[in-house]
Image: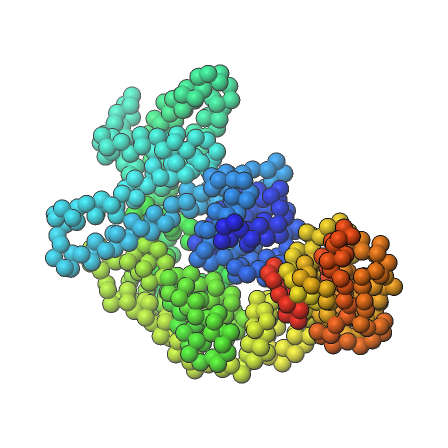
Amino acid sequence: MGKYSSLAADIIKNVGGKENVESLRHCVTRLRFRLIDESIANDEVIKNMDGVVTVMKAMGEYMVVIGEHVADVYDEVCSQLGLDAMQAENKEQKNAKKKSPLEKVLGTIMGGMGPTLHLLCACGIIKGLLVLLTFVGIKPTDGIYMLMNAAGDCFFYFLPLILGFNFAKKFQIDPFFGLILAAAMCYPAIQNVDINLWGYVVNTTYTSTFLPILFGLLAAVPLYKWFDKVLPKMIKGFMTPMLTLIIIFPLTFIVIGPLANMIGAGLNVVLTSICEFSPLLAGLILGGCWQIFVLFGIHGVLTIFAFMDLLAGNPSQLLAFSYGASFATCGVLLSIILKTKDAKLKEVALPSFISAIFGVTEPGTYGVTLPRKKMFAICCIGGAASGVVVALSNLAMYSYAGMGIIGLLGFVNPDGPNFIGIALSAIVPFVVSFVLGMLVYKDSDYEYLNDVVETDIKSVSKEEKTEEKKEAAPALLKEKEMLAMPADGMIKPLSEAADEAFANEALGKGCLVIPENGNVYAPFDGTVRVLFPTKHAIGLASEGGCEALIHIGINTVNLDGKYFETHVQQGDCVKKGQLLVSFEKEKIEQEGYSCEIPVIITNTDEYLDIVEKDHDRHVHGEDMLHVIR
């Protein structure tokens, strides 16, 4: 089993199983599912999984936020779905939901760019480093510079070929056809030269462009699929791409491509005008609200066209405005690390701080700052400060070099880098947020939250979102109760129970305990409501109102009490950890019965959710189930 096998299996199960997955892709931190029916996904179960930060929904996507290990989890999920990466992104279902036009546009653009973002980042870093090399005496005419320039610029120069392959894959035709069409469009001998076709002269270039290959393939796909359908199987393998190419390539080069270039130029004018109208205001709003946009998963909508314009070779100030938000999060997290006395909070904040340095802010946002709203507000203030610095320094993003501190190389202007402005765009949000965090943060303001972090930081974070005041905390905590292990052994999902009535949750939600010995203990302080005469099952009610059935074994009612001994009576008050029932495990198993113990919350309907702590081994008295009203 792989490192993430269990997590992947749990995610697949709780998004509704394989049959509910229409398609899957991932970005830098999130698994992005398109589900046939989002309503059957178990949001709260997924949110509370170890290895999951939270769940978000936006633009028709069901996003499971993982963090920096998302690529590894994605590979494991694809493996368990029985798909490779290409199939996962292109999988279709007959009953798939219709997407809005905006969703289709964004999905198509991300289908072209998403699979190669890491390569784009690598080439962007090389381009930034090349500018720095000129300051240590290396000249553009030097051999090493020329080679490294080719390595850094190749992605952008041959961008249509990369996009052609990815777009064709997205449109579910042979991706190499998209590659060949783009290669023909970028053929060196026909770039920036007059081409006369029956008196119509075209002079254009398609290297380093984005829209022409996209529009060309949009025209090619219906024709390609029609040829593939009507041509005989023996010849369609080579005739389909040949016929499509000789029709679509001239049409794209002469008509579609120039039109696409005009649209791209217009898009650049619009984006530039937005930033030039009031750079300070744009920087203040985008920088200050960026983390909020990320929370709702709509940041891609705001930047996708600017990013597309950047790939086409146009510097983007709009992207630069939002970049400093991650450094603001770094400052807040460091202030919390230095000021808090809560060991568990430090344990969560430290790795989140390291992730934020490299631009991955979701763990810090969802796990630390968002539940502490003042700290999240400070992150937004720091982001706004960064946007103002970018505006005053007239910075822009010239290439995409990744996120966080490394991505600052993308701000290096080849014609004259503003190193002071670049440094300030990261330092100012960090310092502003750090100082405000040091002044504002107090453990005493979040005692109710920090105490619960020790048992389940994620559950409290979710509940705290619905409460604004500290005074409401005692009521909040009363809505959450923890059941302890009633026996030494492994926690398993209830769905694995041998009895179908338990596995289907017909009697209520809960979990399964695989016992290591024959002792069963009280999972909470409460009362014995029911003690079956056959001694194989006991019903309890906690002081908080939770009603639990502990059923020892499957079909052990047939033993009529044989091998069982009770240590309490019906109506007794019991304390957590008190011995309730003993049974002779080996003898029961010799009789052919399973000794697994379903623990059922019989008043499940009174709770918002019931979640297992994990699926590991525990001893009696340790946390097992969260029940949340």
At x 86% / y 58%, what residue is drawn? 560
Residue 284 visible in image? no
Q: Is residue 469 above or below residue 233?
A: below
- Quarter of the image where one finds residue 566: bottom right
Is 342 left or right of 114, judged from the image as shown?
Answer: right
Q: Is residue 35 above or below residue 465?
A: above
x%, y% of residue 483? Answer: 69, 69
Residue 563 visible in image? yes
At x 49% / y 53%, what residue is drawn? 3
Is 238 left or right of 7, judged from the image as shown?
Answer: left
Identify which residue, 283 or 42, lies in the foreground: 42
- Quarter of the image where one finds residue 28: bottom left
At x 75% / y 69%, what residue is drawn? 546
x%, y% of residue 610? Answer: 68, 62
x%, y% of residue 278? Answer: 36, 63
Quadrant for the C terminus in the image: bottom right
Coloration of the structure image: rainbow
Is 593 left or right of 234, judged from the image as shown?
Answer: right
x%, y% of residue 10? Answer: 59, 53
At x 39% / y 79%, what residue is drawn? 435
**Callout count:** 0
